[in-house]
Image (spheres, rainbow, N blue to C red):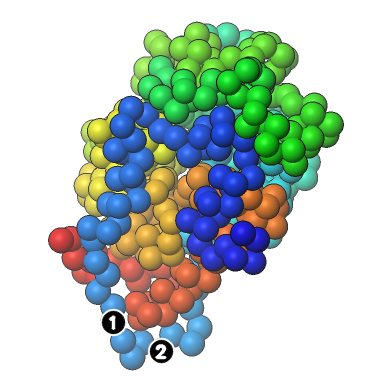
Amino acid sequence: MRLSDCHNVADFRRLAKARLPSPIFHYIDGAADDEITKRRNSSAFDDCDLVPNVLAGVADIDMSTTVMGRKINLPLMLSPTALQRLFHWQGERAVARTARDLGTWFGISSLATVSIEEIGESISSPKMFQLYIHKDKGLNASMIERCKAAKFDCIALTVDTIVAGNRERCQRTGFTSPPRFTPSSVLSYAAHPGWTLNYLFREKFALPNLDTHVEAGTNVAVSVADYFNTMLDQSMDWNMAEKIRSDWGGEFCLKGIMSADDARRAVDIGASAIMVSNHGGRQLDGSRSPFDQIAEIADAVGGQVDIICDGGVRRGSHVLKALAAGATACSGGRFYLYALAAAGEAGVRRITGKLRDEIERDMKLMGVRSVGELNRSMLRWR
């Protein structure tokens, strides 16, 4: 299978599976417990139908929207995800350049494999930093100050990972960061020499936003579960979130909001946006999908905060359904991680281009000339 054979997210997933060692692929692909929520994140869109209008004069359409004060060219953002140079040696740099050229938001994780400073210097398009609150208060303060200095546009505080979800695929494969070559995994690494040679002989793997304070994940191999369970602050509460917003002083997003009550509290503490997200189904299995909650949350906050539907997006029509239900924009991680793993920057550009084309085509087929024309009258739930 070649890059030119990849026409959708499922195609890129197949190519990524062929090109990655098993522990790495299953880290991207896996989720918590029985992975019911992961599957629901996409299948939820199937339970809702679009009702198009016709004869609307759609020769020229406007796909732009505004999120946290920044106008973007299409209502799809590239969510922050961790450890990207494990998936392909180009990592976050490839994703950032693609987002810049698309004219949309891009984010890096606290567990990114490139530094806050490098992204700040190289990317002028809107960029967010996904902040995990660690027990080490000095580390938290350091990351916030570095984001200020690098002129990041937003901090997205992750609120759904105070403990790690039960990611059984990672337990079976022995996935760690950095990778640990064990008797049970070495054959898979050996069977993928392209990945292995790139990992061993290109730029040394590092987590440069953390390694000023901790060795875990860069110099000491740990599982994601062990990292979250030992390093993150489980006492995080609304008061702490409000203090972080105050310390940051800029556009502030809460990533991991799923209930209408929490959405209202996000408004109360001055959040600019919420990412309605269940962490790709990697935390609480059995929780609702983001799309399932958009209408309820939109009704609860009444336009007082931007709503980003994060997770499960595989098609342009999914984006339109979320916007019609009340979202400001959509975002996702797996859809571009599969493409990154499959073909580096060329893959990310191809899948985001495909999704952009789908959004444009589907808007025309829906008879809307701007994303603001999408509304709940165009949806029917089965």
Provide residue 92's location: percent of width, then percent of height. 68, 41
Which residue type does callout 2 highlight?
Gly
**Residue 201 sits above or below residue 238 on the image:** below
Provide residue 362's location: percent of width, then percent of height. 41, 74
Q: Residue at x 35, y 71 (%)?
A: 373
**Does the residue at mark 1 contact the one at mark 2 (Cβ under 8 Å)?**
no
Mark 2 Cα shell of 10 Å, populated few (<14), some (14-19), many (≥20) = few
Q: Which mark is residue 221?
A: none
Q: Let me know if residue 268 appears in the view.
A: no
Q: SS of the residue at dot 2?
A: loop
Provide residue 245's location: percent of width, then percent of height. 49, 27
Q: Residue at x 47, y 23 (%)?
A: 172
Q: Which residue is mark 1?
A: 53
Name the foreground residue: 218 vs 241.
218
Pair 1/2: label in front: 1
* Disc 1/disc 2 C-alpha distance (Å): 11 Å
Specify whether 381 is left or right of 133. Answer: left
Name the foreground residue: 367 vs 220.
220
Q: Which mark is residue 57?
A: 2
Q: Let me know if residue 300 appears in the view.
A: yes
Specify whether 328 is left or right of 114. Answer: left
Q: SS of the residue at dot 1?
A: loop
Q: Residue at x 50, y 45 (%)?
A: 334
Quadrant in the picture for residue 257: top left
